[in-house]
Image: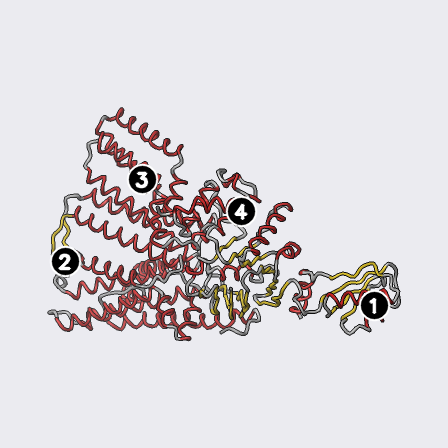
């Protein structure tokens, strides 16, 4: 869906993006993370065709974004952290304006506005002035504006900033729904725990470089990280784990009550491992898969990129 | 309906405002009628129209795009499917719809109650539209240059538009029955000014459209600018009165004289373009990068407009000399009398544009344009005054182009200055290009 090759972007005294290359598959939700000044917003603005890079290529749904930004805009929605709303218009007027501005035929606009508002759960507030809406409602209205022309790609820059926990939860749910409907999303955020709720991929930027771009869940065939927890410590735990050829990178904690390890087997092999542990009379309380925390991957990669 | 125009209607014409302005205006006209009878209504309605359309309208037009930038809605508009023409007229007429609504009440009072001439009202309406279009154009140009705060940009655009329009109104007041001699044709001044106003309005709207194209990421090209330079050069060169300047009776009737004035206009527009054109280190790097890659389309697209008008100026300069050679004129030597002056003007332009780029290519170049303006004011105005005070008028050609005097004094000092300024600008270009990214550890600059 999106292909970026050797993207270079300069500010007058700083190179913001340095030979950035990546591919984004359709229907995925990519969390774009990195420290302040890493180039996240610049990258999103380049993808949106709002900034012209120094060099490199961006292809979006087979459209060359650098050469034909206007073509790309038809397939794109962008939500920036400052929302970009007209406070003196009503929600309905805002959506009608954006529907018209994106070239929707006049006869289709009222229905599209109604459908989009219902999808974002703001239909009952459409006749309120935008300036009177809460931050959460403004956020949803801004997303409604960005998707009213049904773009294939939605770019969001810090969408959860300033939202209360309830509004954040609703936002996560909405983004998951959009992703499940086939829209490709790129979400820039500092809140990794929240991104974990709905992203399928993570891209880490540092100093204008992509230092990691990976799925947030381990793909089939890749080792999973498992954790075994005992009721009481047992010296037989480590030898038992070491004897299994599917197991690697074992870490037994200092209390001896739990161990984490990479496990290359499938679910049947995992059941067999549990049987083996019980056969060794180990007091197993749980054998669970450890989700690959975005925070841990992020920390690990940032450390690696500093070296 | 144009979505941008409709959005402005929603914002600018809510019910309470629709009622408010006629209520206020009726009170104003009533007060005028009570104070001075019917004869007082016409001037008051004209004055109110001028205030609404020129003063307030130019503010609204200047603010129409810049307020979007402040509200952070401009990016959404840039990403919409609204084309540059719809965006231009949607903003121009949409943002000012309220003052036009107010002006329509004034026009009603002027035509129905007052006893003024409809043509005066028509000219004022035209000036109002010109001021608004000019304010929009200047605000767009400043936005693209992006080196000032938005509040300053709005004020500059508004004041610039008002200052550009007021002289036309003043001219009409001074001598409405006068005549203009243009390319040998004698035309009534009022009619000539009306035609000039219409032509300038068309060019202003076209200019706003061209800058809007660039802002909305269409290829803006050079055609509009080239057209405007040619138009203005031909327009100014047509004034027969110019040929009588200084009482030089040799000039009237000379095509070369008209070409020379056209050359001066092209040089002046080169200066204006050099100051107005968006320019930055990044833009320059991209342009040079495209040139190295041999991407002719991109290079042509990004050619600075000052370079285009500079090229036109050069063509006109050469045409002036050739014309003098071919046609000849008693007592006028093309090389000795006109050549040094034309060469000096070109060299001064090279010096000044080089100096501007020298200042722009600094790391902190926020006030580079202002600094360049101050230097130019010193060089062109203060320095000659100081020379005159010190009885050194003979050295004036060092600071300003001079038509009389020995050619080495007219040409050599400015040639030296131009060379030094050019070398300094090139040196700075090489320094910033080589050091900026090295300092940050970026060694892979393409």
x and y percentages locating residue B23 in the rendered image: 34, 29
Residue A48, compared with residue B408, is above or below; it is: above
x and y percentages locating residue B314 in the rendered image: 26, 69
Residue A129, compared with residue B4, is above or below; it is: above
Q: Nearer the viewer, mark 3 or mark 1?
A: 1
SS type, badge 1: helix
Q: Nearer the viewer, mark 2 or mark 1?
A: 1
Towards the viewer: B254 or B81: B81
Towards the viewer: B184 or B253: B184
Residue, disc 4: A119
Q: Nearer the viewer, mark 3 or mark 4?
A: 4
Could you classify mark 2 by the number of other residues whose Cα lies within 10 Å: few (under 14), some (14-19), or many (20 or more)? some
Q: Chain of mark 2?
A: B
Instruction: Same chain for labels 3 and 1? Say yes or no.
Output: no
Residue at x 48% of width, y 38% of height: A127
Q: Chain of mark 1?
A: A
Pointer 4 with pointer 2, Cβ within 8 A: no
Pointer 3 with pointer 4, Cβ within 8 A: no
Measured in 3D between alpha carbons, the distance from the residue under mark 2 to the one under mark 3, in whole angstroms, is: 37 Å
| Quarter occupied by residue A36 | bottom right
Residue, disc 1: A276
Measured in 3D between alpha carbons, the distance from the residue under mark 3 to the one under mark 4, in whole angstroms, is: 40 Å
Q: Residue furthest top?
A: B34
Towards the viewer: B184 or B25: B25
In primary-sequence order, the first of circles 2 and 3 is 3
Residue at x 39% of width, y 34% of height: B17
Say whether residue A259 is left or right of residue B351.
right
């Amino acid at each position: 869906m999106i292909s970026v090759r050797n993207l270079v972007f300069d500010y007058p005294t700083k190179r913001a993006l340095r030979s950035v290359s990546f591919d984004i598959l359709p229907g995925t939700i990519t969390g774009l993370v990195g420290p302040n000044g890493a180039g996240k917003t610049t990258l999103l603005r380049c993808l949106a065709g709002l900034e012209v890079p120094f060099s490199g290529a961006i292809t979006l749904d087979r459209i060359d974004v650098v050469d034909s930004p206007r073509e790309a805009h038809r397939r794109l929605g962008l939500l920036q952290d400052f929302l970009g709303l007209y406070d003196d218009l009503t929600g309905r007027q805002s959506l009608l304006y954006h529907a018209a501005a994106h070239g929707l035929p006049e006869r289709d606009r009222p229905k599209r506005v109604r459908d989009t508002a219902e999808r974002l759960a703001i239909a009952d507030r459409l006749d309120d002035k935008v300036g009177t809406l809460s931050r959460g409602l403004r956020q949803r209205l801004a997303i409604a504006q960005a998707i009213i022309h049904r773009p294939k790609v939605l770019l969001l820059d810090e969408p959860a900033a300033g939202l209360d926990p309830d509004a954040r939860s609703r936002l996560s749910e909405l983004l998951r729904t959009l992703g499940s409907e086939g829209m490709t999303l790129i979400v820039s955020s500092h809140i990794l725990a929240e991104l974990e709720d709905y992203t399928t991929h993570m891209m880490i930027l540092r100093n204008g470089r992509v230092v990691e771009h990976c799925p947030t869940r381990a793909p089939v065939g890749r080792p999973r990280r498992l954790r075994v927890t005992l009721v009481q410590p047992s010296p037989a735990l480590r030898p038992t784990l070491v004897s299994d050829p599917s197991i690697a990178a074992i870490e037994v904690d200092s209390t001896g009550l739990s161990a984490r390890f990479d496990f290359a087997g499938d679910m049947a092999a995992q059941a067999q491992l549990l049987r083996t542990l019980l056969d060794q009379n180990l007091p197993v309380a749980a054998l669970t898969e450890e989700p690959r925390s975005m925070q841990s991957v992020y920390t690990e990669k940032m450390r690696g990129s500093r070296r | 309906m144009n979505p941008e125009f409709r959005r402005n209607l929603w914002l600018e014409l809510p019910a309470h405002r629709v009622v408010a302005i006629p209520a206020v205006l009726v009170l104003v006209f009533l007060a005028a009628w009570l104070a001075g009878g019917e004869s007082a209504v016409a001037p008051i309605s004209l004055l109110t129209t001028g205030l609404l359309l020129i003063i307030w309208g130019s503010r609204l037009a200047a603010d129409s795009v810049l307020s979007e930038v402040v509200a952070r809605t401009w990016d959404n508009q840039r990403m919409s499917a609204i084309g540059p023409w719809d965006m231009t007229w949607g903003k121009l007429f949409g943002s000012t719809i309220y003052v036009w609504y107010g002006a329509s009440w004034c026009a009603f009072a002027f035509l129905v109650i007052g006893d003024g001439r409809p043509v005066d009202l028509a000219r004022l309406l035209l000036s109002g539209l010109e001021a608004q279009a000019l304010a929009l154009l200047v605000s767009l140009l400043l936005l693209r240059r992006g080196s000032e705060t938005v509040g300053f940009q709005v004020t500059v655009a508004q004041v610039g538009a008002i200052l550009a329009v007021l002289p036309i109104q003043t001219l009409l007041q001074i001598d409405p029955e006068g005549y203009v001699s243009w390319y040998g044709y004698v035309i009534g001044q009022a009619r000539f000014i009306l035609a000039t106003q219409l032509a300038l309005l068309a060019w202003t709207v076209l200019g706003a459209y061209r800058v809007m194209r660039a802002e909305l990421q269409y290829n803006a090209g050079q055609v509009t600018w080239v057209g405007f330079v040619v138009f203005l050069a031909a327009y100014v060169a047509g004034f027969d009165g110019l040929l009588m300047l200084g009482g030089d009776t040799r000039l009237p009737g000379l095509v070369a004289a008209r070409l020379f004035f056209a050359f001066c206009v092209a040089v002046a527009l080169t200066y204006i373009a050099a100051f107005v054109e968006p320019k930055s280190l990044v833009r320059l790097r991209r342009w040079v990068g495209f040139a190295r890659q041999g991407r002719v389309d991109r290079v042509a697209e990004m050619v600075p407009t000052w370079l285009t008008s500079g090229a036109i100026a050069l063509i006109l300069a050469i045409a002036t000399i050739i014309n003098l050679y071919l046609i000849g004129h008693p007592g006028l030597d093309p090389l000795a009398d006109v050549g040094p002056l034309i060469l000096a003007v070109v060299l001064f332009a090279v010096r000044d544009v080089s100096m501007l780029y020298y200042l722009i290519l600094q790391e902190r170049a926020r006030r580079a344009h202002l600094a360049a303006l101050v230097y130019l004011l010193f060089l062109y105005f203060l320095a000659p005054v100081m020379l005159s005070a010190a009885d050194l008028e003979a050295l004036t050609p060092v600071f300003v182009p001079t038509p009389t005097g020995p050619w080495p004094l007219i040409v050599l000092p400015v040639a030296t200055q131009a060379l030094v300024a050019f070398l300094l600008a090139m040196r700075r270009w090489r320094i910033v290009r080589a050091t900026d990214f090295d300092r940050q550890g970026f060694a892979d600059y393409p």
